[in-house]
Amino acid sequence: MDRRSPVCTDAVWRLPVTVCRITQFLGEQTAGALLERATACAGDTMEPSMIRDREVVPDFRRSRSHHDFAAPELMAAIDEVLEAVEHTLGVSCQYTEPSYSLNAHNDGDFYRPHQDTSTEFAPRRLLTFVYYLHRTPRPFDGGELRVFDAALPLHTETAGRWQERTWRDWEPEHDSIVFFLPTAWHEVRPVSCPSRQYEDSRFAINGWLCSPDPANRGSAASL
């Protein structure tokens, strides 16, 4: 008797990745003030964005970043919704430390598919957040956040082909924020900004909630 499974050995599960999205997150006045602060960062404060926090690879990621950008009002608002986000995504962010930067995508900029965590470069990241800012009406096209569905093989010898991945695109709407797990594969779709003016960029505050740095635990405990 043939006892082989009737399921094809190349079969792959397609599992949608959970994304928490909140619109009108800070409100018109606060979001407007934060946008003004972002547009004031033009010039020497913006540097080419890096991958793995140490390499500029323009064929893989093209945008500009400001790592000392301060957004305390955004961090306070994230704290207000964190419990609900934790429950939805199944993650605990107790005692985490925020790490974030301002990123500007202008004409032709993009970020190819990647994950936000790895054992080598970012093992402490527990939660990814992206908060969007831009002038209205929106002065650019594209720039969607594409989040790929998880592709899990039914048979261990099958890995699945990247070209067959499915996804969902999320619009970079002004004063909206998304949360997802750093393990999710995602990308920033190419941006078209006809004016090429910095003020017309797709602005985003990208960040993570990270578990405490073990190197600082001793000093923290002594406070």
Image (cartoon, rainbow, N blue to C red):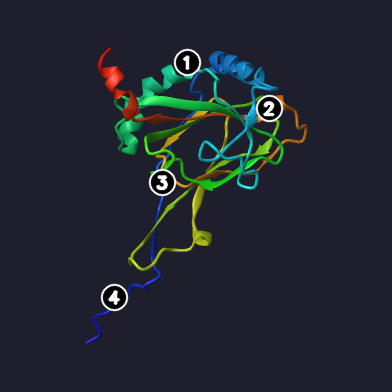
Q: Earlier in the sequence, mark 4 or mark 1?
A: 4
Q: Earlier in the sequence, mark 2 or mark 3?
A: 3
The residue positioned 40% from the left and 39% from the top of the image is 181
| Gap in angstroms between the C-alphas marked 1 and 2 | 26 Å
Residue drawn at the location 49% of the way across and 57% of the way down: 165
Q: Secondary structure at mark 4?
A: loop
Check disc 1 and report the residue beneath it. 72
- Spatial CA distance of label 4 from label 3 is 28 Å
Tell me the crowding category of disc 4: few under 14, some 14 to 19, or many 20 or more residues within 10 angstroms, Cα based.
few
**Distance between mark 4 and mark 1 Cα atoms:** 56 Å
Image quadrant for the N terminus? bottom left
Up the image or down, 129 lies above or below 186; here it is above
Q: Secondary structure at mark 3?
A: loop
The crowding category of the residue bearing disc 1, from other C-alpha atoms within 10 Å (few below 14, some 14 to 19, many at least 20), is few
Residue located at (42% from left, 38% from top): 122
**Residue 212 appears anywhere in the view:** no
Label 1 or label 2, whichever comes before in sequence order: 1
State which tag comes first along the sequence, 4 or 2.
4
Q: Amino acid at mark 2?
A: Pro
**Quick one: SS at disc 2?**
loop
- Mark 3 crowd level (few <14, some 14–19, many ≥20, 10 Å Cα): some
Residue lying at 72% horizontally and 37% vertically, measured from the top left: 107
Residue at which label 3 appears: 17
Q: Amino acid at mark 1?
A: Pro
Image quadrant where residue 125 sits: top left
Q: Nearer the viewer, residue 218 or 125?
A: 218
